Image: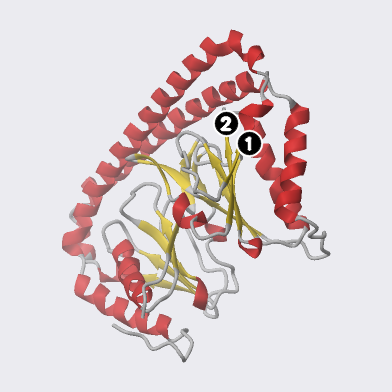
């Protein structure tokens, strides 16, 4: 049996508003089973999910990895769409509690496998790590807020030369291309909100290829900074929802109020915003829309030095935020080292195998699992 496809998204992110969560959109509340994994750092939550994922992939299931914005090597969740099962890390900062306990949601507590007496001997060190990690995250978020303020000034610069009429014409043309004569329905579509990219301890990361790589048609929006790209995405979203399309909406990693990308599986289409720091290389059949064509460039000449300074300052602030995110990760790694010696990982492995068997029980009878 062939290997499945892995789609990678971020359910939460380090933003100008602090840690921002879309965890309620990981999977619908009426899923077959939602397994919420609890436990402290270093207890093996991510490894638990990754090992189960390996078996499901080997059995041909497509997966959706909910990637961790604070550690690019870790995952915060796994969704198996074919059988509507999800495993979710339910610990801070993304606290997840069962909404329909027993019938849908259940808690898997890996904390029951640690030696409480041993951990108590490391109480002072663990508490100090928690304090220091919190301070580093707070500093990172302050720099991200400052970076967002500078980016807003860039928006203002490029907005001065914007031809609103051209933008509106472009939007109407795009809507005709995307939706054709598809009518407005009495049942509106549903929205699912996530991040396609994240500001991580190693810098900005995106997984756009795993999200839009398999759709039939992609529209790539490129051009200078400015709220007009987000405005185009918003209009396409509104029109699709009116026409009954279920749409995945991907938000800006820096500013979660700003929309960047859309995935519309109903019509095999995606809209991708390509700009720093998530440039997207167009494929041969992609349609590229350059929104710079909607800017009257002579108006911007007198503000060229302002834009140049803003760009430099923006990346300085962004890099400083990344520095403190990395500091927070190093402290987190130290905190994990206090938990690892006091964990019974053999017991965790036994529970993982039991959990895998239960997940496979949701598989169709015509699937023959391999191990």
Between the residue at mark 2 and the residue at mark 1, the CA separation in whole angstroms equals 8 Å
What residue sits 21% from the left and 66% below the top? Answer: 343
- Residue neighbourhood size for the residue with mark 1, other residues' Cα within 10 Å, grouped as few (<14), some (14–19), many (≥20): many
Rendering quarter of residue 157:
top right
Q: Quadrant of the C terminus?
A: bottom left
Location of residue 143 with respect to 213 vertically, above or below: above
- Residue 229 shows which numbered tag? 1
Please identify the residue farthest to the front as the structure is shown. Answer: 284
Residue 60 seen in the current view: yes
What residue sits 44% from the left and 19% below the top? Answer: 313
Tags 2 and 1 in contact by the CB under 8 Å rule? Answer: yes
Q: Secondary structure at mark 1?
A: helix
Please identify the residue farthest to the bottom as the structure is shown. Answer: 365
Q: How many marks?
A: 2
Q: In the image, residue 12 lies at what x, y percent?
A: 48, 50
Q: Would you say 369 lies left or right of 44 here?
A: right
**Circle 2 or circle 1, nearest the eye:** 2
Q: In the image, residue 225 lies at what x, y percent?
A: 57, 28
Q: Earlier in the sequence, mark 2 or mark 1?
A: 2
Q: In the image, residue 353 lies at what x, y percent?
A: 30, 80
Q: In the image, residue 49 lies at what x, y percent?
A: 35, 67
* Residue on which the image places disc 2: 223
- Residue neighbourhood size for the residue with mark 2, other residues' Cα within 10 Å, grouped as few (<14), some (14–19), many (≥20): some
């Amino acid at each position: 049996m062939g290997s499945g496809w892995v789609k990678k998204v971020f359910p939460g992110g380090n933003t100008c508003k602090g840690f921002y969560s879309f965890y309620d959109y990981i999977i619908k509340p009426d899923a077959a089973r939602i397994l919420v994994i609890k436990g402290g750092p270093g207890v093996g939550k991510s490894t638990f999910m990754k090992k189960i994922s390996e078996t499901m992939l080997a059995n041909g299931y497509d997966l959706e990895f909910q990637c961790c914005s604070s550690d690019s090597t870790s995952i915060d969740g796994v969704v198996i769409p074919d059988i509507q099962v999800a495993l979710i890390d339910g610990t801070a900062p993304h606290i997840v509690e069962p909404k329909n306990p027993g019938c849908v949601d259940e808690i898997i507590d890996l904390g029951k496998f640690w030696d409480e007496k041993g951990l108590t001997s490391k109480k002072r060190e663990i508490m100090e790590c928690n304090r220091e990690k919190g301070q580093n995250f707070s500093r990172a978020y302050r720099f991200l807020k400052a970076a967002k303020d500078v980016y807003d000034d860039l928006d203002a610069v490029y907005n001065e030369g914007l031809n609103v009429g051209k933008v509106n014409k472009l939007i109407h043309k795009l809507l005709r291309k995307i939706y054709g004569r598809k009518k407005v329905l009495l049942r509106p579509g549903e929205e699912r909100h996530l991040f396609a990219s994240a500001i991580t301890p190693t810098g900005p990361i995106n997984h756009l290829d795993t999200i839009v790589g398999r759709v039939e048609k992609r529209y790539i929006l490129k051009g200078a900074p400015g709220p007009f790209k987000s405005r185009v995405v918003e209009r396409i979203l509104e029109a699709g929802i009116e026409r009954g399309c279920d749409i995945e909406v991907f938000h800006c990693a820096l500013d979660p109020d700003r929309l960047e990308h859309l995935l519309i599986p109903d019509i095999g289409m995606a809209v991708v915003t390509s700009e720093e720091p998530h440039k997207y290389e167009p494929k041969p059949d992609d349609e590229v829309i350059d929104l710079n064509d909607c800017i009257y460039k002579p108006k911007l000449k007198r503000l060229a030095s302002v834009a140049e300074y803003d760009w430099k300052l923006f990346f300085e602030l962004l890099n400083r935020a990344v520095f403190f995110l990395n500091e927070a990760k190093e402290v987190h790694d130290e905190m994990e080292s206090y938990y690892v010696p006091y964990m019974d990982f053999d017991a965790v492995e036994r529970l993982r195998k039991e959990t895998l068997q239960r997940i496979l029980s949701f598989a169709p009878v015509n699937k023959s699992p391999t191990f």
